Image (cartoon, rainbow, N blue to C red):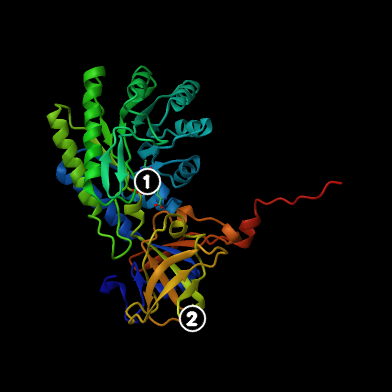
Amino acid sequence: LTDQQINEAGHLTIGGVDATELAAKYQTPLAVYDVSKIRDQIRRFKSVFEDNDVNYAVSYASKAFATIAMYQVIDQEEAHIDVVSGGELYTAIQANFPMARVSFHGNNKSLAELEMAVEHHVGVIVLDNFHEIDLLDQVLREHDASISVMMRITPGISAHTHEYISTGQEDSKFGFDLNSGQAAKALQIVLANDRMNMLGIHAHIGSQIFELNGFQMAAEKLVEIAADWHEQFNYQPEVINVGGGFGIQYTQDDHPLAPEAFVDAIVKTIKQSAGEHHLNMPAVWIEPGRSIAGPAGYSLYTIGSRKDVPGLTSYLTVDGGMGDNIRPALYQAEYEAVLANNPTAKTTETVHIAGKYCESGDILINEQALPETKPGDLLAILDTGAYGYSMASNYNRNPRPAVVFVENGESALVVERETYADLTRLDRSYTKNN
Ligand code: LLP
């Protein structure tokens, strides 16, 4: 937290708005995004490419957080998006997002999803498997249409403790395998199809990555494949897409490089490697999700009950939990929180921050140092913008929180809080038939 984030009343501010006012106006639990942080991160990524003088696309991996308002912000920043479902595509269409800047990912896109993509002139389909090539061909014929495609391959780079190692082979459900010749076979099929414009090659090596070497290895591998394809099939990819995965800082123990440092290393690796292989410098595309949405997001909760286990520990419970942020329960993800109505107060104890869900594993933060608190105080968990709201559920029939955007001292409701009526909207009654 910077000093600017604490106002005269001694409260946390987000985007220039007092967090306690946000809680009073919109209730809790509440997902709040500081929009200037989203814009800033996109601009930083862009400037890396501009400084290196390469063609590029910053394609926001919208699975991290996808709503109409978010797509509008991404559009305002003239970035691309990638979508992974008909639902994300539908949301982007509702946001009037320019379809030419959309890439469609997924390892089992349905016929209906591919039809939707073709009908709306989505920019790129990222081909994942042979079945999909057939389905897409069928859709393109039916619509007498053509479309750009990229091919996702598994680069054989795996996380091995903290190091990324080249395994040669990778056991992954995504993309075409390299060594068995699948990728080369898929390339030939696509090149022979005059409705598919083979734009480039894609790989994604993982998420929340802290080291450069995995990305450098993947970038080099992709250029080697390009060189190989050039030699074998006289085909040169216009685009090399290295996916996302740039790690962010969640706690004081995390020390990732700045996200743009990863991108700089990737671009320089591709430049050098393309030069060595006498290839034209391709455009470089990236797909950051977490690094764009994560640090911009705050989760506001009201503190309620407390349980002290004498001599052992204390549980401080908030009015949300695993329904609005499944990451701690699912991945043992760690976060840090501040007492939003008094963030500078001296901490006096360490507690578990528990959620309200009927499950022992519903602990949002395992060890959080806090000052003395009382029911009604406001807790802000930091950096929750990626894969928090987007993975939210109605577990225990809790309505999902509202989402608010703040920027320049103004707040705007961008997703309404679910109501109890929303929870039963799709339910139908069942009467016993005798
Ligand atoms: N591109 C592709 C093809 C991906 O599969 C992903 C993430 C991304 C880009 C974006 O990665 P990012 O920059 O956000 O790391 N739910 C998990 C994360 C799953 C990521 C899946 N793929 C979590 O909460 O940590």
| Residue sitting nearer the eye, 377 or 25 | 377
Element type where label 1 sits in the image: strand
| Residue sitting nearer the eye, 251 or 37 | 251
In this picture, is 402 found above or below 217? below
Disc with the residue nearer the chain's start (1 vs 2) = 1
- Rendering coords of residue 303 (x, y %): 48, 75
Q: Type of residue at label 2?
A: Pro
**Mark 1 CB lies closer than 8 A to ligand 1:** yes
Q: Which mark is residue 61?
A: 1
- Rendering coords of residue 240 (x, y %): 26, 34
Which dot, 1 or 2, sits closer to the camera? 2
In the shown orientation, is residue 103 left or right of residue 267? right
Q: CA distance from mark 1 to mark 2?
A: 46 Å
In the shown orientation, is residue 35 left or right of residue 276? right
Q: Type of residue at label 1?
A: Ala
Residue farthest to the right, as pictured: 434
Instruction: Kindly indicate whether the residue at mark 2 contacts the one at mark 1 (C-beta within 8 angstroms).
Output: no
Q: Which residue is mark 2?
A: 310
In the shown orientation, is residue 427 left or right of residue 284? right
